[in-house]
Amino acid sequence: NGTHTTKAYMGVKECERIADTGPAWEYSRRLQEAGFPDDLLRQLTKLERRTQRVHKVAQLSCNPIQEGDVFDCNGFKLHAVALPGHTDGHMGFLEPDTRVLFAGDTLLEHGQRNCLLEPTLEPEGDSPDRRRHSLKQYLETLDRLQEMDLSVVYPGHGPVITRPAETISYMREHHARRLDMIDGCLSPGGTTAFEVSKELYLGAQAYERFLAVSEVIAHLDVLVSRGRATSAVRDDGVEYFCRA
């Protein structure tokens, strides 16, 4: 009847994340820790219900892939490579002979790549790392991209990157500047991730505010890991950050 079937693939970690119905509550919990107000949290919950319906349908028809899988594409082969940062299970595809990479959302031409907030789920109690350290992952992925000595990068959207080394350097510099800016937003009495996001992104609402808070938390975690800031969850259940 002329109907063609298209195979869809997704990183195995992404398949697991989308299929798991548990994280929705954990997302809310982590956002409350960040100081997210209840009204915005309700808006996000409604959006989450809609996107989960789409994700479940997509997940059912996707074949899981992982690092090292090879796809033969009419004479050239693409090797699946794990590029965590934007999400924990983000994948790219490298043609090793020409050093061409299909990078998805990992690298954009002078574009800011948002490292999404994702909770760490533990079978018993709360993990010491309550969330994925997304920016730490992304900076490590930039190290890996640099070692690949790439010739061309095809991103998920935006122009083709013909000078990957320059873009990688730009992203390093961008995050270094952002770390300094966020460090400058911290007050002696303690500041929440939501408060920092309001200072940096005045007009963001609903999902945009989630992205803003995600970025702030990612940078705050790096500041803490480098000894430039400290954090503690206080009696109100909200996490406050102070400059070290």
Image (cartoon, grey):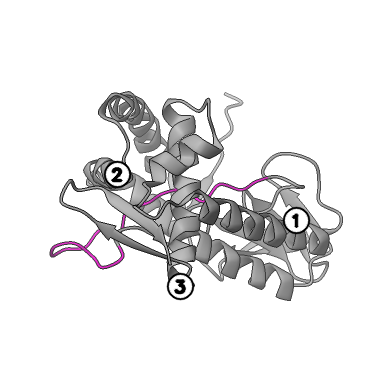
Instruction: Name which of mark 2 and mark 3 comes first in the sequence.
Output: 2
Instruction: Name which of mark 1 and mark 3 comes first in the sequence.
Output: 1
Residue 114 magenta-highlighted: yes
User: Distance between the Cα atoms at labels 2 and 3?
Assistant: 26 Å
Question: Which residue, given by chain and number where applicable, does mark 3 sit on?
Answer: 227
Q: Nearer the viewer, mark 2 or mark 1?
A: 2
**Res. 88 in view:** no
Q: Secondary structure at mark 3?
A: loop
Residue type at mark 3 is Gly
Point out the stretch of residues depicted in magenta: 112-129
Left of 201 or right of it: where is 164?
right
Dominant secondary structure of the residues highlighted in magenta in the image:
loop
Q: Nearer the viewer, mark 1 or mark 3?
A: 3
- Check whether the beta carbons of the residues at disc 2 and disc 3 lie within 8 A of each other: no
Instruction: Determine which quarter of the picture holds residue 207.
Output: top left
Q: Residue furthest bottom?
A: 147
Question: Which residue, given by chain and number where applicable, does mark 2 sit on?
Answer: 27
Where residue 237 appears, as percent x and y from the top left, is 19, 48
Residue 127 magenta-highlighted: yes
Question: Which residue, given by chain and number where applicable, does mark 1 sit on?
Answer: 74
Q: Secondary structure at mark 1?
A: loop
